[in-house]
Image (cartoon, helix red, strand yellow):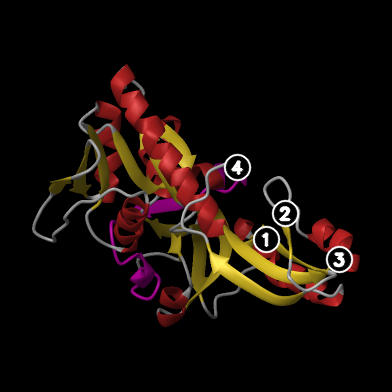
């Protein structure tokens, strides 16, 4: 049995549980339970405060964890990171009152800054040659300037709507973060094998999310042009159609390139283009 610690509530928790389920691992979760066991994989899931997860993994209370990079780095355990997971992306940013004049980070020299991330912010300011007074608070950071507690804040930003709602504007990005898988560095051989199996499943799910399966019909005369646009994993699958002079082409397209490539395929004569989601993708 290998123990995985995840955040007990919030968006990161939901995304983590969805990833585990997409890996084909079944379990029952409840807002009243602080741990659960998978029914078809030797995995126990612990539901913890996100700030506690790096320390629990470092100490071996949990073998693995899913946590934001911002929390991991702030806790001082970046070496625990195994791989990035591609979700729960955000940034740690500096913000000032909307009408406050601001030209560069040098304007914060000697100012008071409220934050929940003094370690990350302190290193950033030191790198910029700025000395400021950091006030560490655990919540409601956005209210600090409006009540006179600080001149600026440094906090996690996703959409920026919370900053706007509190009369603030984002001025500098200090750190970019996403969810990461972390692991205790002294796992037994058996648990390392379970970690490898879990990573294999996660990577297959992530590849599938980034790609689409595409099917189309094309005239034989345009096949070389179509193949040039659709490299696939190794090469496209090409099958003759019942209608002479036409073929069916099947391939995989990266989500980021899909619309651009689809336009090019139509331009060279492709027709009947179908796009399907991929559940798992193993390379």
Residue underneath mark 1 = 250
Q: Earlier in the sequence, mark 1 or mark 2?
A: 2
Q: CA distance from mark 2 to mark 3?
A: 14 Å
Q: Residue at x 76, y 58 (%)?
A: 230
Residue underneath mark 3 = 220
Q: CA distance from mark 1 to mark 2?
A: 6 Å
Mark 4 or 2: the one toward you: 2
Residue underneath mark 2 = 236
Q: Earlier in the sequence, mark 1 or mark 4?
A: 4
Q: Residue at x 17, y 56 (%)?
A: 29
Check residue 126 for magenta coloring: yes
Asked if the residue at tag 2 contacts the one at tag 1, i.e. Cβ–Cβ closer than 8 Å, the answer is: yes
Q: How many marks?
A: 4
Q: Earlier in the sequence, mark 4 or mark 2?
A: 4
Q: Earlier in the sequence, mark 2 or mark 3?
A: 3
Name the element at disc 2: loop
Residue 4 in view in this figure? yes
Q: Is 163 or 81 nearer to us in this picture? A: 81
Q: Residues within 10 Å of mark 4 (few under 14, many from 20)?
A: few
Per the rendered image, the range of residues in magenta is 125-148
Q: Residue at x 85, y 70 (%)?
A: 245
The N terminus lies in quadrant: top left
Q: Position of residue 237 (x, y in %)?
A: 70, 54
Residue underneath mark 4 = 127
């Amino acid at each position: 049995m290998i123990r995985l610690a995840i955040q007990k509530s919030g968006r990161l928790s939901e995304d983590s549980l969805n990833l585990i389920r997409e890996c084909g691992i079944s379990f029952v979760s409840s807002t009243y339970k602080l741990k659960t066991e998978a029914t078809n994989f030797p995995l126990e899931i612990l539901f913890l405060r996100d700030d506690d997860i790096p320390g629990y993994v470092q100490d071996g209370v949990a073998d693995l964890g899913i946590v934001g990079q911002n929390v991991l780095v702030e806790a001082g355990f970046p070496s625990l990171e195994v791989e990035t997971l591609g979700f729960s992306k955000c940034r740690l940013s500096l913000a000032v009152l909307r009408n406050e004049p601001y030209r560069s980070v040098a304007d914060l020299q000697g100012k008071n800054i409220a934050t929940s991330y003094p370690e990350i912010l302190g290193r950033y300011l030191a790198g910029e040659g700025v000395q400021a007074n950091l006030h560490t608070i655990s919540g409601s950071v956005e209210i600090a300037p409006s009540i006179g507690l600080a001149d600026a804040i440094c906090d996690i930003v996703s959409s920026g709507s919370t900053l706007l709602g509190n009369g603030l504007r984002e001025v500098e990005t200090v750190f970019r973060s996403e969810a990461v898988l972390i692991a205790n560095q002294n796992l037994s051989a058996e648990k390392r094998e379970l970690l490898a199996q879990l990573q294999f499943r996660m990577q297959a799910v992530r590849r599938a999310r980034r790609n689409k399966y595409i099917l189309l019909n094309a005239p034989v005369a345009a096949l070389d042009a179509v193949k040039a646009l659709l490299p696939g994993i190794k090469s496209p699958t090409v099958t003759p159609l019942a209608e002479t002079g036409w073929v069916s082409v099947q391939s995989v397209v990266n989500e980021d390139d899909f619309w651009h490539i689809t336009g090019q395929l139509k331009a060279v004569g492709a027709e009947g283009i179908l796009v399907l989601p991929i559940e798992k993708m193993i390379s």
